[in-house]
Image (spheres, rainbow, N blue to C red):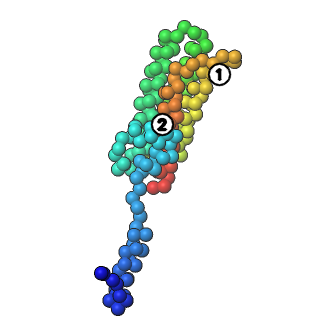
Amino acid sequence: MFTFSSSSSSPFGSTIVLCLIVASLITPIKSNHLSDVCIKSKNPRFCLQVFGINPHRSPYELTQEALNLAMTNAYETKNKIHIFLDETKHHDLKVIYKQCLHYYQSIIDGLEDAVGHFMKEGLYSAVNAIGNRAQVNAFLCEKSFQGKIGYAYDSTLEKDNENMEIFGSIIVSAVDLLYDT
């Protein structure tokens, strides 16, 4: 049987154990920035899926990637809106698609400014505003389908708008990490 006796312990051994405990408590833990971004987004699972499994990216890299992913999504949605606009014969739907086209062009303009200027110049509050604008404009596009008095149209852009809202929230979450670094 193995026992400790007070006569065999040394003050040196106790000091080392105490130092190790204190050192482990004050050593900063390296954060997983990807998890930090995704957990604050509107859909953490979607966020992790679009970013992939590489957690070793800086907050700046994550923000840049979020902007690029959002821009790709915005251009794809804008192209889809153009197709719907060309194919529909219904006047009210044409009005709705034109509104959505305006909202998405505004998103694209903001994202291009963020990638081309604001990130490089460290204007993170402007990037944050663009992430918020992406969320609001996608929401407004979706609500345009219910905007006619007495009639609600089925949205053909529901998933696109939902994704853009999520991308906007990812941008905002990523920018929040930039403020902390």
Mark 1 in CB contact with mark 2 (< 8 angstroms): no
**Mark 2: secondary structure:** helix
Amino acid type, residue under disc 1 in the picture = Gly
What is the distance, in whole Å, between disc 1 and disc 2 at their CAs? 24 Å
The C terminus - image quarter: bottom left
Q: Is residue 176 visible?
A: yes
Looking at the image, the residue that sits furthest to the top is 89
Q: Which of 131 and 149 is in front in this view?
A: 149
Taking the image as shown, residue 69 lies to the left or right of residue 8, namely: right
Q: Which residue is drawn at 45% across and 34% down?
A: 70
Count of marks placed on residues: 2
**Mark 1: secondary structure:** loop
**Dot 2: few (<14), some (14–19), or many (≥20) neighbours within 10 Å?**
many
Q: Position of residue 180 (x, y in %)?
A: 48, 55
Find residue 66 and name its label.
Answer: none
Q: Residue at x 30, y 81 (%)?
A: 2
Q: Residue at x 48, y 32 (%)?
A: 163
**Dot 1: few (<14), some (14–19), or many (≥20) neighbours within 10 Å?**
some
Looking at the image, the residue that sits furthest to the bottom is 7
Q: Position of residue 18 (x, y in %)?
A: 40, 79
Figure check: 162 above or below 9: above
Amino acid type, residue under disc 2 in the picture = Phe
Looking at the image, the residue that sits furthest to the left is 1
Q: Is residue 113 visible?
A: no
Q: Position of residue 74 (x, y in %)?
A: 46, 29
Find residue 147 and name its label.
Answer: 1
Q: Earlier in the sequence, mark 1 or mark 2?
A: 1
Q: Position of residue 118 (x, y in %)?
A: 47, 42
Looking at the image, the residue that sits furthest to the front is 1
The N terminus - image quarter: bottom left
Find residue 167 and name its label.
Answer: 2
Q: Residue at x 37, y 83 (%)?
A: 14
